[in-house]
Image: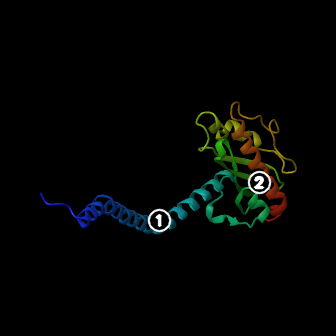
Amino acid sequence: MAKKTNADRQENAFQAMIWPVLVLVIICIACSAALAALNKVTAPVIEENTRIRTLESYVAVLPEGTSADSLTELTVSEASLSDGVTGAVSAPDGYIAVQVAAAGYSGKAVTGYVAFDASGSITNLLVDASTQTAGIGSAVGEESFTSGFAGFSASGHVSDGTPVDAVAGATYSSNAVYNAVNAAIDCYNNDLKGAA
């Protein structure tokens, strides 16, 4: 039997240990490049779908007959943006809708759309609580909770019991809605009142 030389052992070590690592690195680079290309292709589609869903949500909280085409985007201050406000629109009839997000249970965002009439009263509230615990925290998105905000004046702030009680067992989620509505009220009073 022939003796293995040192060069043969190094070649075997290369084949056994280094070659698989190089193959995996090449595969990872190829997959990363493919994902980057896919992201570049799908990013505009995702952005457009998000814009459409946002417009649909604005229209849902504004008075019946409001269309997405009739909305005017409003500028909000940096202070409002840092409070969680992500956008605002006005409708031709003087109504204003504010999109806002606040951290709920486990820090996951609860997104709300708050509509104000020309006198500064909340007319409607739509809450996306799909990130919250199903059946518990998600209850803050139900009409039985959100409808209690209608008629509340932007001259004050909401809290547990004013104008509605927190959902039992969903303190974090309820507080997220209160914080979101308060951020929308502050944005309305400081940036948007009279803008429509």
Residue 78 shows in this picture? yes
Kindly indicate whether the residue at mark 1 contacts the one at mark 2 (C-beta within 8 angstroms).
Answer: no
Give amino acid for label 1.
Answer: Asn
**Image quadrant occupied by the N terminus:** bottom left
Looking at the picture, the colour scheme in use is rainbow
The label shown at residue 80 is: none
Q: Position of residue 68 (x, y in %)?
A: 62, 61
The label shown at residue 39 is: 1
Which quadrant of the view contains residue 51?
Answer: bottom right
Q: Position of residue 35 (x, y in %)?
A: 43, 64
The label shown at residue 184 is: 2
Q: Position of residue 167 (x, y in %)?
A: 71, 33
Residue drawn 76% across the image and 47% down it = 179
Which quadrant of the view contains residue 59?
Answer: bottom right
Relative height, residue 32 to residue 166 (above, below): below
Give amino acid for label 2.
Answer: Ala
Residue drawn 53% across the image and 60% down it = 49
**Which sits earlier in the primary sequence, circle 2 or circle 1?**
1
Residue 196 shows in this picture? no
Q: Position of residue 171 (x, y in %)?
A: 72, 36
Which quadrant of the view contains residue 184?
Answer: bottom right
Q: Nearer the viewer, residue 58 or 133?
A: 133
Q: Nearer the viewer, residue 119 or 53?
A: 53
Bin the neighbour count of mark 1 within 10 Å (Cα to Cα): few under 14, some 14-19, many 20 and up: few
Residue drawn 63% across the image and 44% down it = 129
Mark pair 2, 1: CA separation? 33 Å
**Image quadrant occupied by the C terminus:** bottom right
Q: Secondary structure at mark 1?
A: helix
Work out which residue is located at the far left of the displayed protein and give it. Answer: 1
Q: Secondary structure at mark 2?
A: helix
